Amino acid sequence: MIELISTDILKSLSNDELLISTAQAVRAEKSAITNVTRHFQEVFERQLYLPTYSSMFEMLKEQYGYCDGSAQIRIATLRLIKEVPLAKEKLEDGQLSMSVAANIQSFLYSERKQQKPYSLEEKIELVNACTGKSKFEAQKEFAKRNPEFEKRDSVRPISESKVRIETTISIEALQKLNELRDVLSHVKPSMTFGDLIARLAEDGLEKYSPLRKAERAKRRLERRALEEKVLGEVRTRVPTSSGEVESDEPIASVVSVESDTSVESKAEIRDAARSRYVSAHEKHQVPNDGLGCTYVDKISGRRCCSKRFLQLDHVTPFSEGGTSSAANLRWLCGQHNRARYRLRL
């Protein structure tokens, strides 16, 4: 454990003694960072953040108290070490800073997304080129390899209800956004890009969100049930063997025995041929409190609550006879859904 020096002792030191003590503290800090990074690397390799957390990022934030930015830097550094072991040596001897290492990993990730994967030799060359350089100088190295390299998005709060987003888009994309603003000018003549993004987000969720699709499916079923109820209460003429007579019975109650038997037979056939398919109506019936992944760690009792990559999971596995009905389904994040079977959670 690192021994802390009190402020009173520091104030009592001479200038030379204070500088010597500061150099010692810096060396201790570097050793501590190296030690912590080695621990995190082993935890990352073994995926020990599961089952309590859905990701290493969540573990660093919630268990160890890192802010989003610090946690992200450490995650990116761990990934770079895994891809380029040389980076570990550079970090430990102080030639490569953690922020530069994280930026290298972000650059490589961006290149992969642009279908420009780097070989191990190219990655090693890039790490060597960034060794001993500042974050700004490292970004110059990135620009040499890809002049179109896009700066990573940044999000920072500017008030309790608003954030500022900085990103880079192509001229073509900007033209499309301006064209869309013109199309929507009748909705809001002075529409800003912030207003436009909010509108696109709402339209996108309405179109692609499985929860909203399920809600619409539920409303359609309720509307059809109401229509059938109204029609069933209207008197109608029902054909019989002796001709047409007026019936006081609602349509819904005039069902033949053969028809009932047919429906039951069909139900039995459907039960015999089980399917993994989950209808929109069934999805809507699956409990969802809006808090995300419902996985709860058996030891700590902590719920995951991750809202990313949510998937429907069979409580009783499908392979063990579990059905695809809402009563046997729950929402899990992708990590816990996969880990549940791989790690027998």
Image: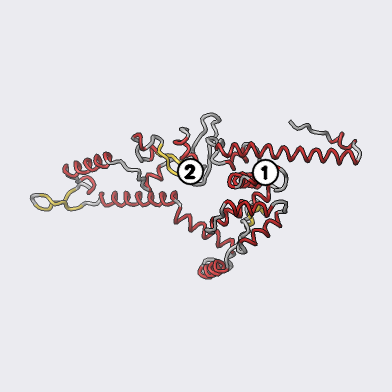
Where is residue 17 shown, x and y percent of the image?
Answer: 89, 38
Q: Position of residue 226 (x, y in %)?
A: 32, 50
**Which quarter of the figure has residue 147?**
bottom right
Give me the residue at 72% from left, 43% from top: 93
Q: Are marks 2 and 1 in contact (CB under 8 Å)?
A: no
Q: What SS does tag 2 mark?
A: helix
- Dividing the picture into quadrants, the one containing residue 329 is top left
Query: Which residue was labeled with disc 2?
Result: 334
Residue 89 percent coordinates (x, y): 67, 43
The first of marks 2 and 1 along the sequence is 1
Relative to 299, 134 lies left or right: right
Task: Work out whether 41 lies above or below 186.
Answer: above
For residue 127, side relative to residue 52 (left or right): right
- The residue depicted at 44 percent of the width and 36 percent of the height is 341
Q: Mark 1 points at which residue?
A: 89
Please tell me whether mark 2 or mark 1 is closer to you in this view.
1
- In the foreground, 301 or 24: 24
The kind of residue tagged 2 is: Gly
Q: What label sits on residue 265 in the rendered view?
A: none
Q: What residue type is labelled 1?
A: Glu
